[in-house]
Image: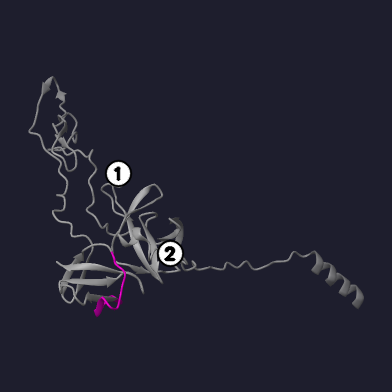
Amino acid sequence: MRPVVLSLCLIVATLLPKIGTAQVAYRPTPAPQVTAGNAIWQINGEPIFFAGSFYYPTGPTVFFDDQLMARVGEYLTVPLYADTSQEALSRVFVPIGGAVMKPYERRRAGALSGTVGSTTPSWPVQVASNALQTSGGVGNQIGEPLMVAEVRGVGTSGLAGTMQSVVSGLSRTTEPTTVQSVPRPTTNTGITVVFEGARWVSAGIAVAFSPDRFSPIGDYHGFPVYREKQGSADTIYVTVVADGPVAPYKRY
């Protein structure tokens, strides 16, 4: 009897399907091995072209986060990353040394005019140029005549056109109204830093560091700050990347 039972158990074990446990292993994004720390285009603050748009350097630097950042492409052999928690292609991050990443942002113009992304844009939001503004509410009641509206392009003073409707054989023209954009910025100081209670603005391209030429006077968010030994007290030099060039800033 026992051999029969053992044979039945062996047959059942052979015929039953094997059930496995599926496991999903999450792999963090590898840290960038190539950086733009010494790239002239990065040091000079030039825009980059990616995915059909220009991206401009803006905002403070951030640290690489292997849980949120994913590689989305490259620019001149330098890998580009995106924050997966933000709107796709609204910003890209360029590694500039160690775990430091510089954000580059796309201007919200054209089809993106008048919209905002996952974060506050670094530039004023542009209003779509074809927006119309009418007085008294156009066509909000049956039989109400349309009002004349004057349309001006964003940032321009030229007349784009007028419209007039005739209702029940009578025409009526109202005083034209205008659509104006937010005034353009009157100043553009560029990249600035706050150091020793004063504001300093970018004063040119970075230069090579030399201990014979510069003396340390402090640090800016972990980056050493120097002053020329024979230079003016109104100019400081901030380290761009660790052991790299230093960028000049003048007192604002």
Q: Position of residue 70 (x, y in %)?
A: 45, 62
Above or below 191: residue 131: above
Return the x and y of residue 181 as percentages of the image width and height.
Answer: 17, 46
What type is the residue that disc 1 sits on? Gly
Asked which secondary structure carries label 1, the reply is helix
Tell me where residue 82 appears, x and y as whole percent.
41, 60
Of 157 and 87, which appears nearest the observer? 157
Q: Amino acid at mark 2?
A: Met
Region rendered in magenta: 206-223
The answer, for residue 1, to whether it is visible in the render is: no
Where the C terminus falls, by quadrant?
bottom left
Disc 1: CA contacts within 10 A as few (<14), some (14-19) or many (>=20): few
Q: Which residue is mark 1?
A: 110
Question: Would you call the spot at circle 2 few (<14 residues within 10 Å), some (14-19), or many (20 or more)?
Answer: many
Q: Quadrant of residue 42?
A: bottom left
Instruction: Determine if the magenta segment contains residue 71.
Output: no
Label number found at residue 147 = none
In-front residue for pair 79/91: 79
Residue under label 2 = 69
Kindly indicate the quadrant of the structure image that contains residue 41: bottom left
User: Gap in Å between the C-alphas at discs 2 and 1?
Assistant: 27 Å
Looking at the figure, which quarter contains the N terminus?
Answer: bottom right
| Secondary structure of residue under mark 2 | strand
Coordinates of residue 147 in the picture (x, y in percent): 13, 32
Q: Is 12 positioned to the left or the right of 83 in the image?
A: right
Say left or right for 61 vs 35.
left
Q: Quick check: 52 above or below 119? A: above
Q: Is residue 7 above or below residue 147?
A: below
Q: Please report the residue visible at 43 percent of the width from the left and 60 percent of the height from the top.
A: 78
